[in-house]
Amino acid sequence: MSHACERGRALAETGINGEHVVAPATASDDVLRVEHVSKKFGPVTALRDINMHLRKGEVLGLLGDNGAGKSTLMKIICGFQRPDEGQMFLRGEPYEPHSVDQARKLGIDAVYQDLALIDELSVFHNMFLQREKLKGPTPFLANRVMRTEARAALDDIGVNVPRLNVPVARLSGGQRQAIAVARTVHSEADILLLDEPLAAMGAKEGALILDLIARLKEEGRVSMIMVLHNYVHVLTACDRVNLIQDGVISLDKPTSETSVEELTEIVVEEYRRARQAARAAGGS
Amino acid sequence: MAVETGSQPPPTETSDKGPATSRALASGAWTLLKRFLTLREGSVIVITLLTIIYFSITLDKFATSGNFKTLLPYFAPFAILAAGEVFLMINGEIDLSIGAVYLASPFIFYEFHNGGIPLIAALILALIACMVIGLINGLFTAVVGINSFITTLGMLFVIEGLTLIISHAQPVDTPGTNVAKLTTFASIFGGGTYSELIWALVIITILQIVLTLTRWGVYTVAVGGNRLGAAEAGIKVRLVIIRNFILCATLAGLVGVLEAVRTSSVQPDPSGANEVLFDAISAAVIGGTLLAGGSGTVVGALIGAIFLGVLRDGLIIKGVNADYLSFYLGLAIIIAMAANTYVARVRKGSGVG
C-alpha cells in the first residue's frame, strides 16, 4: 500500500515536467474527441489531463499500467461516470452523457472489464440486458426472438455456447467474455469501447475475437477504442496506440511507427523511474 | 473447430425395444423425478406434501373441508406478504416494516372512512399511504444508501408508534363490516370464505409472471445478482429497488385490510404484527428465495406459506401444547431449509437449470 502511494507521488513529480504529455491532437474525420478531461476519486487522481481523439473506422489501442486510468477513461466516455473537468465532442457536437443509456442512444457502447454480466440470468437475457425485446405492445419479453438473435450473434463470432437458457454462471471465462463482446458488437453502436476484451480468453477464443475486430475494421462502420495488455495484440489489431501514464496520454503513435521494443522500453523506463523515486523517497 | 469449453448438452437417450424398455422407462422416470426435485420449488413441494400426508393419516379431522377453510387464513395472507418480500429479497434487500404496515393500514383505512370518505376510496387512499411508506423505505435504501435492514427496522418502529398514537391503542370495528351479516364489500375484501385465497392466487400468479416474463423481473434479478454490472448495463438500479419497496409495502397494506375485514376488528397489536413479518419472511425463505439476492420464486413463497400453515394447523389439531408450537415450527423451518440447501447443491451439480 505505502509502496503504491510513493510510486504514485513519484510519478506525479516526474510527469509534471510534461516531457511526455502529448498535445491535443485532432483529425478532420474525428468521430470522438476528448479534451482536458480529468477525474478524481476523493484524494486519488485517476485522470489528470486527457486529450484523445478517435477517427472514423479507426481502432485505437489504449495501453497503460494498472491504475493508470484506462478503465476510468472508458467509463467516462461511455457515460457511466462523469468527468470533473474537460469536454468531449461526438461527431463535432459537444458530448456530455449523463447515463449509459444516453451514450448508447448516441451510438457509444462498452464492454466493461468486469463484463457486467448477471450470473443468475440466462445467456440470452444477458445479451439483451437493458435492451430487451418485447412482444409487440405488451410488457412481456419476446424470449424466443431474443434467443434466436443471440444464437445468430454468437454463431457470427464463432464461439460455441451450447445452451442459451442456462445462467451464465455455468459458462467458462472465455464464453462469458465472448457473450459480453457479442452483446456490444451486435448493438447499434458505431463507437465501441472494449476494456480488455481478451482478458479471460484462451488463445483460440482470443483469436476469434481478434478476427471479429479485424472484420469490423474492414467493414469500416464502427470505430473502436480497445484497452489491451499484450503489445503484439496492439500492433496487429490497432491502427494507432495511446499510452496512459499517470493520468495523461504520454504517447500517441500509429502502430506502423512503433514496435514491441519501443513500447516495452517505455514501460521499463516507467518502472525504473518509479523504483528510483521510491528509493529516493525511502532514503530521505 | 468451434471452441468448446462449456457444459455439454445432455446426451440423447436412445431406448431400444424389448427387455431394455422397462429399464429405459425406469431411468426416464428417475430423470423426471430428479428434474422435479431439482426445481427451485421441488423440495419444498415434496416436504409440504409429506407433511400433509402425515397429518391426513394420523389425524381424522385434518383432511376435511371444514379444516381446509380453517387452514386458509393460516397461509393466504402470508403468501401475499411473502410474495412482496420475495421481490425485495431477490433484489438483495429486505423489508422488516411489512408487519408494521400491515398493522397501520387498516387504521389509516378506518380514519379515512371516519372522515367521510367512501369505503373503496378510503381503501385506495390507505394503500397509497402504504405506497408512500414503501417509497420512503426505497429512497432511504437506494438513494441515501442506508442498509435496508436498518432503514426498515427504523420504519417498523416509526409506523408501529404512529399506529399506537393514532389509535390510542384502542381496537375499532373495521369499516364496511357487520358482525351480523356479510356485506358485499366485506365478502370481496377478506370476509368471504375464499376471498383471501383468491386474492393470494391472483397476486401470486401476476407476480410470478412479472418476475419471469417482464423487464421488471429481469431487472430485479439483475440488480440482486450483480448491482454494479446492472448499473453498467444501464439499468436504473435505484428505480428498480424503490419500485420493489413500494410493491412490498402496498401488498402489506392490502393484507392488513383483508385481515381486518375478515376479523371485523382492527387490533393495535404490534407483537402480532411482528409475528406476521417473521411468518412472511419464513415462507419466502422456505420457498427457496435466497436472502443473498439474485434468485427466488413467488410460487415457492406460496408453497412455503402453505407449509407453515399446514404445520401450524396440524399441530393445533394434534393438540400440541401451545408452548411447544413455536418450538416445533422453528425446528421444521430449520429442517426444511437444510433439505432445500442440500437440493440446491444437487441442482448445481446436476446442471439442471
Image (cartoon, coloured by chain):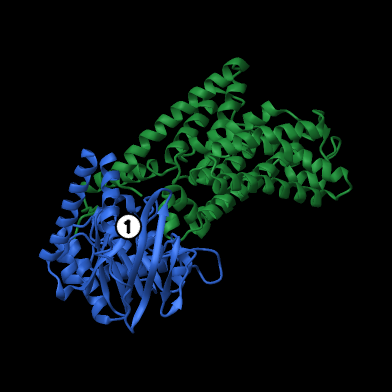
Chain colours: A blue, B green
Check the residue under mark 1 and report the chain it is in. A
Residue A237 versus residue B87 in the image, above or below = below
Whole-percent x, y for residue A173 in the image: 25, 53
Residue found farthest to the front? A284
Report crowding for label 1: few under 14, some 14 to 19, many 20 or more residues within 10 A (C-alpha). Answer: many
Look at the image and tell me in which quarter the N terminus of chain B lies.
Answer: bottom left
Residue B230 versus residue A3 in the image, above or below = below
Q: Is label 1 in a helix, a strand or a loop?
A: loop
Q: Amino acid at mark 1?
A: Gly
Q: Which residue is mark 1?
A: A69
Q: Is residue B176 visible?
A: no
User: Which residue occupies 55% across, 31% down?
Assistant: B308
Q: Quadrant of residue A196?
A: bottom left
User: Which residue occupies 54% across, 24% down?
Assistant: B329
Q: Quadrant of residue B194?
A: top right
User: Which residue occupies 68% across, 28% down?
Assistant: B272
User: Which residue occupies 30% across, 47% down?
Assistant: B351
Whole-percent x, y for residue A171 in the image: 28, 53
Say left or right for B259 vs A258.
right
Q: Is residue A74 visible?
A: yes
Q: Nearer the viewer, residue B217 or B177?
A: B217
Residue B334 versus residue B38 in the image, above or below = above
Q: Nearer the viewer, residue A89 or A97?
A: A89
Residue found farthest to the bottom? A28
Whole-percent x, y for residue A100 in the image: 45, 64
Say left or right for A104 vs B198.
left
